Image (cartoon, grey):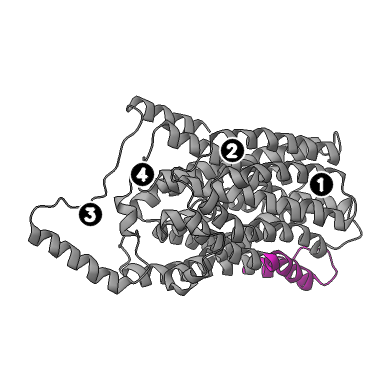
Amino acid sequence: MLLLLLVMFQQFQLSGSFTLVPSYIIMESTKDDVCTVIQAASSENEKNDDSQTLVDSEESSSFPEGGWRAWLVVLGAWCAIFPTMGIMNLYGLLEDWLAEHQLHEYSKASISWIFSLWLFFFYLGGIQIGPIFDAHGVRYILVPGCIGMTLSMMFLSVSHEYYQFILGFSILGGLSASAVYTPSAACITHWFLKRRGLATGIATTGGGIGGIIFTNVFGILSNKIGFPWTIRILGFIFLASLMVSLLTLEARLPPSPSAGNKIDIRALKEPVFTMTSIAVIFAEIGLIVLVTYYPSYAQSHGITGALSYQLMTIMSATSIFGRVIPGVLADIWGRFNVMFGTCAVCTILSFGLWFTAGTDKACILAFAALVGFWSGPAISLTPVCVAQISKTESYGKRFGTTIALMAFALLVAIPVAGEILKGQNRGKVETEYSGLIGFSGAAYAGACLFLFLAKGASVGWRVTKVF
């Protein structure tokens, strides 16, 4: 939040706004020069088909790239992402609590479906919410999303039966969070082009800060005032943050009814779009499995008491820097390049550090800190990578298509990880996590592969090419 305010102050000092001109926009000089440029562009278009880095219409659009109005949108997106992404850091703690209290008669694999279904509806909502945003604007879907997300926390606080958690939290909460997150990410693309990575990175720090606050609130209050009032307090925090997003989020481009209220299935015919979608899905699987099961891994390997809660705080804290710094570098070195690099590091950390950590507390803490930073771009650069290969006016439905595909993948990812854990321990105390760690690490490796293929199909195979 402080970083966002400093950037906004800097913009005010610079008279409100400024415009960045892409280096490849060349001044017209003669008719022959223009013809040469057009022919070259046409040839390049034929080579790369629909997977250009940025479409011609995007280059001619006037993106503010800053100013009070644009940074207020980033603030609104931050306040929207604060609860929607921040709550994901609670999954592991909530699962452990429910397994010991309200749902003690259920296995962890069964309880994991509550959070898997939340993720499913969260991402599945994008299949319709993205196109609605393109056609009708932001408030049409943001208002019911804010109301529904607050209500879902209140329902969670009074739930005791398995079906109540599914209906009140998984379905209502997931769909409502989708109605908040999707338009907030889309609004940023209306205001930023060259600085999109920075703006999105700042906005997504809301999830990391939310993770710090929510895990500490839950860890401190749940044993003092009980589960119901702890969840209600979190719900009131959600409500306050969402009210700010309602006041500040705004799309720059007018609604386009001609965009239609349906997803862009045709986008899947574009190889670059399809490979990009697969890549970010793998990255998300690696992250969600890690966030969900790392607390129980730590507890089963000697990290107990307050320190087990603080692990997620450490991970959330380092992820704040992991969302901003790579976002800045992505605007310079290329969004796909930075995303590839960070996923590669997560793969190495999973197999090199987590796999060998055992009961070494120093290794467990070090992994939490390191992976928190390097996994940050899986959240912050996903919408930026999709936006890079999409026109702004159709971004909502294309991003909706991507996260709808993600929904079906995540629906089974957490339960599959749970079954791997269950099968490896065969009814004993769950201390063997090598299969689950391999599952998470392999997902990150898959993300690397498809990011590499997407870049190669779009701009060639030269490693140093900015993309």
For this view, does 193 lie left or right of residue 141?
A: left
Please give the residue where the numbered disc 3 appears in the rendered image.
Answer: 24
Disc 2, SS: helix
| Front position among marks 2 and 4 | 4
Quick check: 46 above or below 230?
A: below
Quick check: 321 above or below 333?
A: above
Quadrant location of the C terminus in the rendered image:
bottom left
Disc 3, SS: loop
Task: Give the residue displayed 82% in from the left and 64% down from the top.
Answer: 110
Task: Give the residue displayed 52% in from the left and 36% down from the top.
Answer: 75
Q: CA distance from mark 2 to mark 4?
A: 22 Å
Q: How many marks?
A: 4
- Residue 157: x percent and y percent? 83, 43
Please give the residue where the numbered disc 2 appears in the rendered image.
Answer: 79
CB-based contact (under 8 Å), mark 3 and mark 2: no
Q: Amino acid at mark 3?
A: Tyr
- Badge 3 crowding class, 10 Å Cα cut-off, few under 14, some 14 to 19, many 20 or more, is few
Please give the residue where the numbered disc 1 appears in the rendered image.
Answer: 156
Examine the rendering and report whether any part of residue 309 can be seen: yes
366 or 21: nearer the viewer:
21
Q: Amino acid at mark 1?
A: Leu
Please give the residue where the numbered disc 4 appears in the rendered image.
Answer: 63
Residues in magenta? 411-438
- Residue 217: x percent and y percent? 73, 36
Q: Amino acid at mark 4?
A: Phe
Examine the rendering and report whether any part of residue 342 can be seen: no
Mark closest to the chain's N terminus, 2 or 1: 2
For this view, does 105 lie left or right of residue 131?
A: right
Q: CA distance from mark 4 to mark 3?
A: 16 Å
